[in-house]
Amino acid sequence: MIEIIKRYIEEYKFSDIHLKEDKPAMLRINGDMITPSEDIISSSELREFANETLSENQKTRLEEVRDVDLAFEIDNYRFRANFFYTSDGLSAVLRKIETEIPSMRELGIPFVMQEIVEKPNGLVLLTGPTGSGKSTSLAAIIDAINTTKQGHILTIEDPIEYIHHSKKCSISQREVGKDAHSFASALRASLREDPDVILVGELRDLETIQLAITAAETGHLVFATLHTAGAPNTINRIIDVFPAAQQEQVRTQLSQSLHMVVTQQLFKTADNQGRVAAFEIMVCNHAIRNLIREGKIYQIESVMQTARGEGMATMDYAIEQLVLSAQIKQENVEVIN
């Protein structure tokens, strides 16, 4: 199995490998699924690969919970993987993680997002569907802070994707399930670990969200991701997690601590040789902070449409700019709402 994966690495520029018992492997290339070979991945090959790749704890989780996340390396290539059971037996999806962290400029991250590295505290949310490049954008932002500022950066991930090495900053990377019991427990402990910057891989539950907001309020710059589309949906998702009696307080906290909500989506480039990101950006100016505090979330998009001079952009506008600059074609546009 390892040799097959090495061959795919050499021959194809893919983002993901899909493996199923007694089926040909499939690759995702520029968003499309292809079958590079009709060669069958046998049940014994896939199970042997899982046995070699998973730790004993991960094997136990796979058998008990029926799925497990992890990261591993083949030669100099790093993968984020999910092994899981379906009605057809064991399956796995392996996402290739580039070992070299791209710069924000290389990713086309807008300048207003690049400025966020200078903030001393507050909450920054990156949102979008799975596979939209959130982890890569966050890695670029963390690397920029690591390169230009001094301090302690703490990341909490499941699993650890990009490996950061200390430059100007001291970096501590914790993996949920290995170095910490949960996102919430790691985030709770982080407040005693003297971080300046905290990255939370995913805001999964009420406790993690509350702790992230508290960390942002108490002098830390906090980055986190959510699987939501658009700033209004993201803010509503956070508020709706809390009981009705707490929602007014949470709106007040968000109105004070939230800096920015970015929704990211990838589109095929015009030459079909890669993908480029479109960024919807909401910057928390005075007007938006008031709307959050007053619960008028539905009015936020209108403010975004009229505040482009402050770096804000709706997804429609971001896509329009990519089309006008000939980076993508209109027929390749499918917006996720």
Image (cartoon, rainbow, N blue to C red):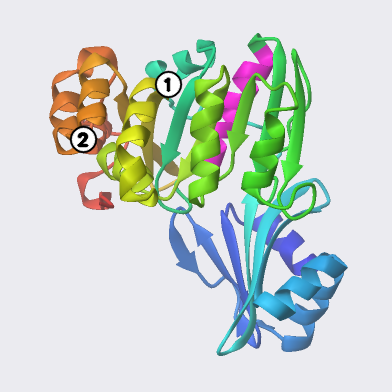
In this picture, residue 306 sits left or right of residue 216: left
Q: Secondary structure at mark 1?
A: helix
| Residue for badge 2 | 295
Q: Magenta region: which residues?
A: 133-147
Who's the residue at 68% across and 18% down the image? Answer: 146
Who's the residue at 55% across and 44% down the image? Answer: 208
- In the rendering, which numbered label is found on residue 125? none
- In the rendering, which numbered label is found on residue 113? 1
Q: Of label 1 and label 2, which has the lower sequence position?
A: 1
Q: Secondary structure at mark 2?
A: loop
Farthest residue toward the front? 245
Residue 142 appears at what percent x and percent y?
A: 61, 25
Q: Nearer the viewer, mark 1 or mark 2?
A: 2
Is mark 1 in CB contact (under 8 Å) with mark 2?
A: no
Who's the residue at 44% across and 34% down the image? Answer: 125
Q: Amino acid at mark 2?
A: Gly
Q: Amino acid at mark 1?
A: Met
Q: Main secondary structure of the magenta part?
A: helix
Identify which residue, 336 or 193, lies in the foreground.
193
- Whether residue 8 is visible, yes or no, is yes
Residue 62 appears at what percent x and percent y?
A: 72, 74
Q: Is residue 241 above or below residue 277?
A: below
**Magenta segment: does it hold 122?**
no
In this picture, residue 279 sits left or right of residue 36: left
In this picture, residue 168 sits left or right of residue 119: right
- Whether residue 137 is visible, yes or no, is no
Residue 73 appears at what percent x and percent y?
A: 79, 52
Who's the residue at 35% across and 33% down the image? Answer: 249
Identify which residue, 47 or 293, lies in the foreground.
293
In this picture, residue 8 sits left or right of residue 167: left
Identify which residue, 94 or 113, lies in the foreground.
113
Q: Is residue 56 above or below residue 153?
A: below
